[in-house]
Image (cartoon, grey):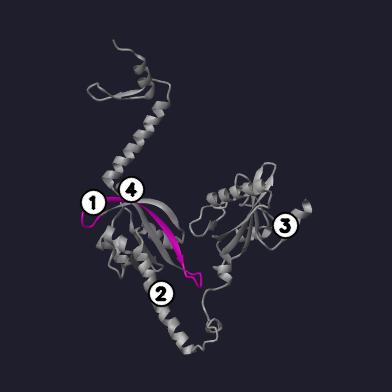
């Protein structure tokens, strides 16, 4: 066993093993280097063991969630055992957030498999180089020639066609961005340009500029953002999108409010921020923010109060005591379920 662990620790492929509680219990030296361990030789596993994949900075692509992926593997593994066959191996694409790695070095194809032990199902993660990075999807003229099935191809004509397609790509990307039903906007790396999609311009008004965007300093000067309770007005340096671009760190569910420039309504919303990178170089180029769960502040207060009351009622209903509330004139306006049970047990003649 010691020999096997020694071999596993020294192989060049990054290997991580998760326990049934889905926390790391083993990582070889290659995995420790990928995940940013300060000294994988002198301090193996430091900062890695005992942590789930999300906390290790392993983010799944295409909006996949680790819990759902691991649950699916558990189900497939149990079915394989019932059928008497070997457990499946799932392939998932992921990116690590370790500083210092290049764009290509951060992307992996993870081979995920299960290993049954006395304390339950363990998960083995083998991090292979991503095929999407190794095989760029940029067609060459030679490839087009070989795919022409003997029909002569004029290289000049092919180059002209590809150039025309390349000119259409920004238009297609803009159309996709505008077709999203969630308000969103993009902020460039130099902080000087905002571009909002059609939904954001409809919801937030002309303050976000037109279809061609607007200048960053001007927007931050005329736009007021508040906390979700409209008690404190944020300084421009504290705007969530600007902080993300400066720190280059994504964020989720940032609650804030703003006053509509036309109607004067107070609106609260939840903002998610994503970092944007150049596909070819991996360089950071800006941030993308999505504005979700927009709600008028008055409705937000009503719903918040309702949630607090529901929580209060739930707690009171669980108590063994008799609990009720009254209005200022002494009339009972609410009582716990235990009070209701006692009242229903009385027979009124």
Residue 54 at x, y = what percent? 54, 52
The residue beneath circle 1 is 265
Q: How crowded is mark 3: few (under 14 residues within 10 Å), some or many (20 or more)?
A: some
Specify which label sits upstream in the sequence, 3 or 2.
3
Lower sequence index among marks 4 and 3:
3
Span of residues in magenta: 260-283
Mark number for residue 169? 2
Q: Closer to us: mark 1 or mark 4?
A: 1
Provide the secondary structure element on which disc 3 rests: helix
Q: Residue 4: where, in percent of width, then height? A: 76, 54
Is residue 201 in sight in this rendering? yes
Q: How far apart are marks 1 and 2 (CA)?
A: 38 Å
Residue at the disc numbered 3: 8
Which disc is residue 197 wearing? none
Q: In this view, does 216 lie to the left or right of 319?
A: left
Task: Compare residues 77 and 230 and report the one nearer the observer.
Answer: 77
Of tags 4 and 3, the one toward the viewer is 3
Report which residue position mark 4 lands on.
228
Q: Do we see residue 220 in this rendering?
A: no
User: Gap in Å between the C-alphas at discs 1 and 3?
Assistant: 61 Å
């Amino acid at each position: 066993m010691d020999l096997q662990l020694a071999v596993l620790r020294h192989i060049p492929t990054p290997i991580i093993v998760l326990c049934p509680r889905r926390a790391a219990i083993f990582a070889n030296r290659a995995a420790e280097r990928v995940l940013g361990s300060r000294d994988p030789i002198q301090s193996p596993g430091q900062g890695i063991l005992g942590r789930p994949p999300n906390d290790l900075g392993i983010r799944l692509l295409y909006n996949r969630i680790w819990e759902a992926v691991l649950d699916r593997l558990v189900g497939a593994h149990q079915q394989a055992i019932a059928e008497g066959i070997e457990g499946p191996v799932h392939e998932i694409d992921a990116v690590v957030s370790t500083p210092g790695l290049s764009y290509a070095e951060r992307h992996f194809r993870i081979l995920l498999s299960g290993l049954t032990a006395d304390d339950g199902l363990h998960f083995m993660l083998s991090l292979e180089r991503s095929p999407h990075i190794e095989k760029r999807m940029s067609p060459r003229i030679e490839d087009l020639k070989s795919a022409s099935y003997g029909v002569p191809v004029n290289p000049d004509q092919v180059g002209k066609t590809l150039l025309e397609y390349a000119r259409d790509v920004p238009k297609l990307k803009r159309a996709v961005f505008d077709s999203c039903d969630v308000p969103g906007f993009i902020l460039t790396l130099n902080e000087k340009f905002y571009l909002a999609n059609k939904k954001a311009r409809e919801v937030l008004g002309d303050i976000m500029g037109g279809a061609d965007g607007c200048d960053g300093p001007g927007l931050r000067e005329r736009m007021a953002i508040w906390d979700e309770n409209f008690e404190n007005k944020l300084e421009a340096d504290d705007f969530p999108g600007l902080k993300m671009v400066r720190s280059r760190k994504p964020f989720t569910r940032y609650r804030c409010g703003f006053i509509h420039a036309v109607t004067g309504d107070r609106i609260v919303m939840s903002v998610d921020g994503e970092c944007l990178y150049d596909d070819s170089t991996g360089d950071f180029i800006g941030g993308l923010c999505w504005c979700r769960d927009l709600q008028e502040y008055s409705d937000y207060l009503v719903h918040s109060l309702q949630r607090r009351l529901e929580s209060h009622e739930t707690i009171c209903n669980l108590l063994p005591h008799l609990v009720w509330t009254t209005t200022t004139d002494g009339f009972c306006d609410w009582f716990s379920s235990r009070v209701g049970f006692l009242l229903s047990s009385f027979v009124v003649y």
